[in-house]
Image (spheres, helix red, strand yellow):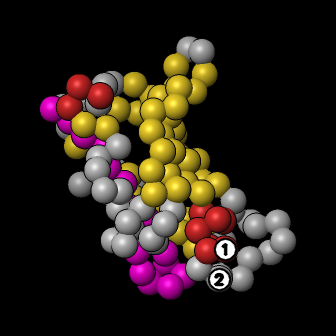
Amino acid sequence: MGKLTTHVLDTAKGVPAKGVKVSLYRIGDDGLEPLTTTITNADGRTDAPLLIDESCTSGLYQLVFSTAAYFRSTNTPLETIPFLDEIVIRFGISDATKHFHVPLLVSPYGYSTYRGS
């Protein structure tokens, strides 16, 4: 069966982003359904897949990364109102038997993501 994983890298410091709050939602007809919330470990990854086996189904999803809180916790200088507070990534899973990896490369003023492997 399939799975969903993520990985957060702090590109401003060139290190894995430890301690980033990551929340996963399923997007349905009635709005957002909360599925899980976790924190990245010392390698910038979650300790377990966000979805795996039967919980990994086809559909639309949303990941929310609490990046301003992370940067504050690492004493990274931010504006009073940070440019990036929470980063929201909406994506779809069409074939739930595959591995979907959604990495986030982030700094206080920019980010990128892609479907990884």
Residue 106 seen in render: yes
Which element carries disc 2, helix, strand or loop? loop
Q: Contact (CB < 8 A) between labels 2 and 1?
A: yes
Whether residue 40 sits left or right of residue 73 in the image: it is left
Q: Quadrant of residue 78?
A: bottom right
Residue 9 seen in render: no
Position of the C terminus, as image quadrant, is: bottom left
Q: Which residues are magenta?
A: 1-16
Return the residue at label 1: 72
Q: Residues within 10 Å of mark 1 (few under 14, many from 20)?
A: few
Q: Residues within 10 Å of mark 2 (few under 14, many from 20)?
A: few
Residue in the picture at 82% in, 66% down: 81
Residue in the picture at 66% in, 65% down: 68
Whether residue 31 sits left or right of residue 83 in the image: it is left
Residue 26 location, x and y as percent?
Answer: 47, 29
Q: Residue furthest left?
A: 1
Position of the N terminus, as image quadrant, is: top left
